[in-house]
Image (spheres, rainbow, N blue to C red):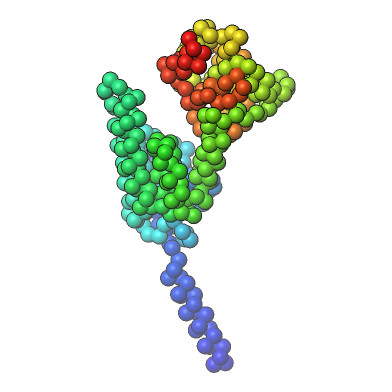
Amino acid sequence: MKKSIYTLVSLLGIFLLGSCNINTYNITATFPDDSFNGQVAMLTASSDGSVLDSVIIAENKAFFTGQVKEPVLCMIKNDRMRGQLILEKGDITIEMKLPGAVSVGTGTPLNDALGGLITKYNELMDEISNYQGEDEEGYFKSVWTPKFTQEIGDIFKANKNNDIGTTALMYLSNYGEEDSIDTFFAQAGEIVTSRGPIQKIIKQREALKSTAEGAMFTDFTIEDSDGQSIAFSNYIGKGKYVLVDFWAGWCGPCKREIPNIREIYDMYNGEDFTVLGVAVWEKPEDTKKAIEELGVIWPCIINAQSIPTDIYGINGIPHIILFGPDGTIVARGLRGETMKAKVAEVLGR
């Protein structure tokens, strides 16, 4: 009997000791007005969108409580708005704001750090958006980008193995100096590199390296809207320079680039040069409608979806690549006057 009592006491002690190590979070999300009452608010994981908890909003508030093993980037959202926070031990508050404003958690160390990162990022983006100088491209490359890399990079270095670092690394992969990106990725800890968005970026960067300027083109085959198989190699490596526009009809910047491509096509299309469109991320019927509305007269591969963008490491469109007569990648990321100049240069005209 005495042995049983000692065993019970020992087990109780272990339980209490374990309880002290549970990372309990309490989240209070405040919504703008009572029109949200009765609606569902969800706590979701940012990495995969999985729903961790859901509650009914009452008196303009939603409360979440639970335990978390390690801090993780999450979102509070409903049909009308969303906010970002780090799920970690402590009392977290978040003021939910309408789209266009930033909603971020506060009250715990990592949430306060996340707020600082997002504030800095928005300041930098406002700076380049509001630039009024004459040489915007030169300022962007020689001043703003190094500044962005330095300031966001410093935040990343202080958070190399948590989700502040995950978010900072995502920012850097989009706007940081290209020569510095690999260094940041090499410094990232296991938590950061395990996140789905970062793994996707790593694959995208590997694809970029394998399809960099000077590399031979990588072929792909798709089934078009008529059920016919079409290979990229039907057009590339056939003895002509080919300007390839990866685009979609819903994409505003893609539409704005079409007149520049049309000017190049009208000027140079012939025995040694042509243009090819590759429609991605879009329904075939929408592409066909856009082709007619925009007056696209060059050949276009339709229904390519994400096949070529995965292969060529493309994460934004339009993305325009110039291929040489043998299929070598001559230049990529071309736009506007730079594109016109590059085509004129290689054709010697």
- The percent coordinates of residue 4 (x first, y second) are 56, 88
Vertical relation: 197 (above or below) 261: below
- For image coordinates 38% across by 48% down, the residue present is 156
Vertical relation: 210 (above or below) 159: above
Q: Residue furthest front?
A: 348
Q: Residue furthest bottom?
A: 2
Question: Is 90 left, or right, of 259 in this rendering?
Answer: left
Compare residues 159 and 241 and report the one nearer the observer: 241
Vertical relation: 112 (above or below) 284: below
- The percent coordinates of residue 222 (x first, y second) are 68, 26
- For image coordinates 49% across by 77% down, the residue present is 14
Quarter of the image with the N terminus is bottom right
- For image coordinates 65% across by 24% down, the residue present is 232
- The percent coordinates of residue 344 (x first, y second) are 47, 13
Can you see residue 155? yes
Determine the image quadrant of residue 119. top left
